[in-house]
């Protein structure tokens, strides 16, 4: 995918639908062992937030491609002592070939992208989690054969995952319904952007009714009710979000062939029950594995590897 070489990936709308589909195709080929691309480059991981799947999947992806990974832990580098982002970015571009950042503010990520003349990847911000949603799209495509027309229902907090899911579904011609408590909806700018992308050809629906949102849906998706940095409000959120729990009763309203997704980590007994996450409908572990494959495809594409 020469068109992506050298570009940044700061959010889902940095890609058009055909580029997303090509990435998913490459990820599927890499997953099946049909592509032996090698990429002897160096990836830097600058993670201000804790991580399991993102850190490990990016590291393994780069190692399997023949490259190397440097963990730029803010606690043991100068970025944790107040070095300006612009200074750090201009130094790192001279050492690294590509940089993945997991942080809080989208603005910090964008500043890195301005000053570092190497590809910068959004490995999560409070605004978006685009790498996660690429893996979600690959998982849905594996289950249903294609993406167009599939209905995805997200239940819970209108957070970064909800934002990227709305944009990703709209880009790929999918219907997306987001059911949240009234005071926890996605930000208006993202909703309007998703609706503009959908152009009335597919649904972009917000509701506070989890049953209506789930009705006949093919994909039921949830995330934790309190994200990193919101731990102080976790207990107070539980009664507010309880009606949005993904459980067997709620799934009776979904399509009989519906699958269940969760981006993990899961708080079992809160946003999802043990019975559901371990049940026959769950594709959570395939979804987690697919983080590796889509990120490998993304690294190959942004670096222009052969």
Image (cartoon, helix red, strand yellow):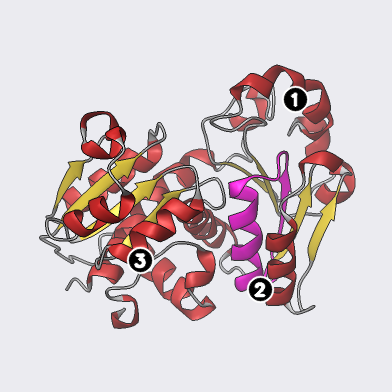
Mark 2 residue element: loop
Measured as percent of width and height from the top left, residue 91 is found at 17, 55
Q: Which mark is residue 114?
A: 3
- Residue sitting at x 80%, y 78%: 200
- Residue sitting at x 58%, y 69%: 146
Measured as percent of width and height from the top left, residue 232 is found at 63, 20
Q: Which residue is mark 1?
A: 237
Cα separation between marks 1 and 2 = 33 Å
- Answer few, some or many: residues within 10 Å of disc 1's Cα (few below 14, many 20 plus, some between 14 and 19): some
Q: Is residue 269 left or right of residue 164?
A: right
Q: Nearer the viewer, residue 212 or 179?
A: 179
Cα separation between marks 2 and 3 = 31 Å
**Span shown in magenta:** 148-174
Q: Mark 2 or mark 3: which comes first in sequence?
A: 3
Cα separation between marks 3 and 1 = 37 Å
- Residue sitting at x 61%, y 28%: 230
Q: Which mark is residue 173?
A: 2
Magenta stretch holds residue 152 = yes
Task: Say if 198 sits above or below 28 in the image.
Answer: below
Quadrant for the N terminus, please: bottom left
Q: Is residue 52 left or right of residue 178?
A: left
């Amino acid at each position: 995918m020469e068109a992506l070489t050298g570009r940044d990936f700061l959010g889902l709308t940095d890609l058009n639908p055909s580029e997303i589909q090509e990435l998913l195709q490459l990820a599927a080929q890499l997953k099946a062992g049909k592509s032996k691309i090698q990429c002897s480059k160096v990836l830097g991981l600058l993670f201000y937030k804790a991580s399991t799947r993102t850190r490990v999947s990016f590291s393994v992806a780069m190692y399997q491609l023949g490259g190397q990974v440097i963990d730029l832990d803010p606690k043991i580098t100068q970025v944790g002592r107040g070095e300006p982002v612009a200074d750090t970015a201009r130094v790192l571009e001279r050492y690294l070939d590509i940089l993945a950042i997991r942080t809080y503010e989208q603005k910090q990520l964008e500043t890195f992208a301005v000053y570092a003349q190497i590809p910068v990847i959004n490995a999560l911000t409070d605004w978006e989690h685009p790498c996660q949603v690429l893996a979600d799209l690959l998982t849905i495509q594996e289950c249903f054969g294609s993406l167009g027309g599939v209905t995805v229902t997200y239940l819970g907090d209108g957070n970064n995952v909800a934002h990227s899911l709305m944009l990703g579904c709209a880009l790929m011609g999918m219907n997306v319904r987001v059911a949240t408590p009234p005071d926890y909806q996605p930000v208006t700018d993202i909703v309007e952007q998703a609706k503009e992308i959908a152009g009335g050809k597919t649904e972009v629906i917000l509701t506070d009714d989890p049953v209506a949102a789930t009705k006949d849906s093919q994909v039921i998706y949830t995330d934790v009710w309190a994200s990193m940095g919101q731990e102080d409000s976790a207990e107070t959120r539980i009664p507010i979000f309880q009606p949005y729990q993904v459980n067997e009763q709620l799934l009776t309203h979904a399509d009989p062939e519906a699958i269940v997704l969760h981006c993990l980590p899961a708080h079992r007994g809160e946003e999802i029950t043990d019975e559901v996450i371990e049940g026959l409908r769950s594709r959570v572990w395939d979804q987690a594995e697919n983080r590796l494959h889509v990120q490998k495809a993304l690294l190959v594409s942004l670096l222009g590897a052969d």
